Image (spheres, rainbow, N blue to C red):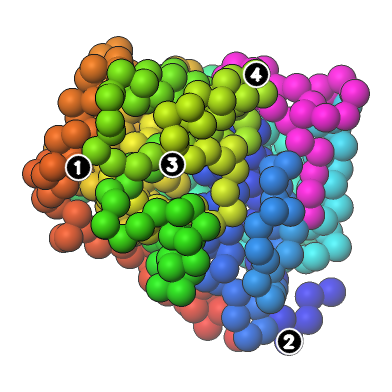
Amino acid sequence: MVTASTYNILMYSHDTYGLGHIRRTMAIASHLRGHGVNVLLLTGSPLVGRFDFPEGVDFVRIPGMIKKTNEEYLPLSIRLSARHALNIRRNIIVATAKAFQPHLFIVDKAPLGLKREVLPTLKWLKRRMPHCRTILGLRDIMDDSESTRREWREKGIYDVLDKYYSEIWVYGNRDYYDSIAEYDIPPSVSEKMVFTGYIPRAQPRRAKMAEMREEESITKKERLVLVTTGGGGDGYPLMDAYLTMLENMEEPPFRSILVSGPFMPKPMREEVHRRAHKVKARFHHFHRRMEALMGLADVVVSMGGYNTTCEILSLCKPSLVVPREEPRLEQRIRAEVFKSHGLIEFLPWSELSPETLGEKVTALIDNPRGCCHGISDFRFTGLEVISARLEEFRGQDS
């Protein structure tokens, strides 16, 4: 039985490709924890153990899966068939919900979970714990309108949203991107949608910044460009173009730090490391304190995933976004929207080259606020709205 002394929040993040889902989930979990609140994360991220977990937050690791295409997933490490691995994941998710008995179940991004693995848990909660509120948390943009509508119709997502979710939290600003209109959300579902605003990231402390500056051997007078490709699975072309840009410069007028991401294939990662060393750029394949690293940067170059964009804007950093356009257009759409509001500089993937990258980076270094004039007026409300919803839920349950 659920005891009155604790309020249990179960969070699910499938994490099959990058770092964005687990980092967003961690940011929300860290904020929701408090007196009498337990937060338990269900995740397939192989990197979850590298994060610092605050008191009141813990995790259950389900077998990892790796995304090959939009529809194909394979076990990350264990030598089992995809079906066998998914059965294990599904059983762990249901068993955890039964044992933990959550008051609140928050599912990140995928309404059904990976390959429908969350559906049995949603059904069990509705049948056996009807007072448990089920929340779907969506990033601001899923994909282009046509693709999302088609996918949701084919997979029965609209019916699932209507039948199994108490609320849908959209981690974005409706004035920037109206997902209700774009994704043709029916009234029975749209009335449950709450646009929370974007999810901020923690500000690094000055002591951590100073420590990081010393670790990276960056003086206060030097200007720094940070290049990050998130998880890195598809980030090599950006790293390659940036390194070629540096290799073509006689004396770069700025320092560079490259973070490839842990999912960049090892041969590519090793090549990036080798080339970075030759042009005197710092290299990391993964960094636990990205917020401190970003805090040092004068300019950030990225592919514009939701998580990275929120980190950059939380720190008010001028940035250049080179968004991928496959397998989804999510990053491209966000880059266009944010560019139109003066929040980022934008370089289409089709125009990526050492020359175009050099032009954009140099312009940002010389005039950082020229294209990013809207940063100072950007407001994060995501965690405030989420906290207000939690308080209302707890008040209704008391």
Name the residue beneath numbered marker 1: 365
Q: Which residues are the magenta region?
A: 60-83
* Viewer-closest of 181 and 5: 5
Q: Report the residue at 59% width, 38% height from top.
A: 285
Amino acid under label 3?
Answer: Ile
Give coordinates of residue 392: x percent, y percent: 47, 77
Q: Report the residue at 62% width, 30% height from top.
A: 263
Mark in the foreground, 4 or 2: 4
Name the residue beneath numbered marker 3: 257
Q: CA distance from mark 2 to mark 1?
A: 53 Å
Name the residue beneath numbered marker 2: 5
Q: Are marks 4 and 2 in contact (CB under 8 Å)?
A: no
Amino acid under label 1?
Answer: Ile
* Label 4 crowd (10 A; few <14 / some 14-19 / many >=20): few
Q: Is residue 376 magenta?
A: no
Give coordinates of residue 248: x percent, y percent: 30, 18
Instruction: Classify residue 358 as left or right of residue 60.
Output: left
Name the residue beneath numbered marker 4: 267
